[in-house]
Amino acid sequence: MSGYRLWYWPTLQGRGEFVRLALEAGGIAYEDSARVHGVEAMLADMAAHAPFAPFAPPYLVAEGRAVAQVADILLYLGDRHGLAPGDDAMRYGLHQLQLTVADFVAEAHNVHHPVAAMAYYEEQKPEAARAAAQFRDERIPKFLDHFEAATRAVAGEWVAGGRWSYVDTSLFQVVAGLRYAFPRRMATLAPHYPGLVALHDRVAALPGVTAYLASERRLPFSEEGIFRHYPELDGD
Amino acid sequence: MSGYRLWYWPTLQGRGEFVRLALEAGGIAYEDSARVHGVEAMLADMAAHAPFAPFAPPYLVAEGRAVAQVADILLYLGDRHGLAPGDDAMRYGLHQLQLTVADFVAEAHNVHHPVAAMAYYEEQKPEAARAAAQFRDERIPKFLDHFEAATRAVAGEWVAGGRWSYVDTSLFQVVAGLRYAFPRRMATLAPHYPGLVALHDRVAALPGVTAYLASERRLPFSEEGIFRHYPELDGD
């Protein structure tokens, strides 16, 4: 195998998808290692990394060294493969946006697991219904307002200006995930976010992303990941 | 004013405390700006920053430029003031740990706001009791196991080895916050985490931190921040 090993749960998009999309868009060789070697191999590998073992997947291994946490992985890939501008102000600015994406992802997961992250959705459905109402009505618009502003902040087709960065591929996934999980809510909201919708489409048209989305490497959305479609949690 | 402006809610430790501690430990000049100029000034200032306005406080302003998100601020300060080793592997590794601290902080906040982050604790007490049980029994030990391992990963008194970094000041705050919010649970758990407890004490003994903790600049823990002491959410 040449290139990177990406270790993540092999049956779901989840947080790993933000890394997969950046690698695929950048044409960077990687192995989706748990899909090849299995989950037991991942858990054994994860515990073996020094000095700081990952807390959880996803993590990326290159030359025997592991980098974990989605935003840290993307910072690392950005530095090494030009997936983010070298200019310092833009570099910290993009990372800041990625960390806000991470906060949004955590809130999106919390909707279906509000009181017990380690238990099943079915064990917390009334609480999830309450969490979903606030998420739909207040949190989605608040975050999308922020991301929409980011698409307009710099002249050019991409968040950073003239070329795509890992923040663009991440915002693609935010839009795609919300459309899957909250189709009714997104039908109402999408017209208010033309910049984000256009950015989503531009990312989907990147050759690496187009090829990826058409391949079996792109796992389907499902009720295992971050963005889950439970119709009872959706609403206009 | 010389040095940085740190903007954060003026009456609570919250997420801002992770930045305050690193600045104080490093002897870096800053103004805790909302305590001087007020919250309205903060909200006006926050909206004015380009290209990417902060999503929320805390954020740091230097030479007119804002950096937001605690982990991004600490990365930035680490790079500029030697609050983290320059070695690349350690640099990404420390950032990875800081992002896991951020995950833990989000979970700690979620305990008292499981179903509605924008509403009051008093409106979600039964749900909070359920969230707290899992947090105490499963999540605190899982994270502290991880952080304890980090204190033993590299030879030397600090997480990065021979000198303190922003991860050390952050882990100090994790221990201090848990002791405040969950005193009964921490009385049970602390003996299992001697590395973390010793690290907490070493950070408290750093001259900049000792002076800070004794000053009025250190706000008290309270039921406004991340780590809140609600006796009904604690347990052995």
Image (cartoon, coloured by chain):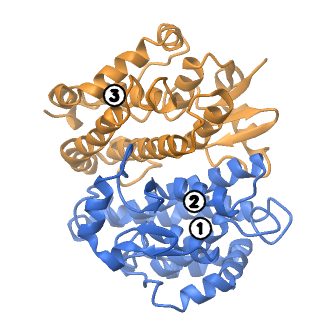
Chain colours: A orange, B blue
| The furthest residue to the right | B155
Asked if one can make out residue B201 in the rendered structure from this viewpoint, the answer is yes
Residue B206 at x, y percent in the picture: 69, 82
Q: Chain of mark 3?
A: A
Q: Is residue A99 left or right of residue A152?
A: right
Observer-nearest of A152 and B62: B62
For mark 3, give the secondary structure: helix
**Relative vertical location of residue A56 with respect to residue A178 in this rendering, above or below:** below
**Relative vertical location of residue B45 with respect to residue A177 in this rendering, above or below:** below
Residue under pointer 3: A175
Q: CA distance from mark 2 to mark 3?
A: 29 Å
Q: Chain of mark 1?
A: B
Residue under pointer 2: B74
Observer-nearest of B225 and A13: B225
Instruction: Determine whether label 1 and label 2 are within 8 Å by CB.
Output: yes
Q: Amino acid at mark 2?
A: Leu
Residue A84 at x, y percent in the picture: 56, 32
Q: CA distance from mark 1 to mark 3?
A: 33 Å
Q: Amino acid at mark 3?
A: Val
For marks 1 and 2 on the same chain, the one whose residue lies earlier in the sequence? 2
Residue drawn where x is 28% and y is 46% of the image: A128
Viewport quadrant of the N terminus of chain A: top right
Category of crowding for the residue at label 1, using alpha-carbon neighbours closer than 10 angstroms: few (below 14), some (14–19), many (at least 20) = many
Residue under pointer 1: B170
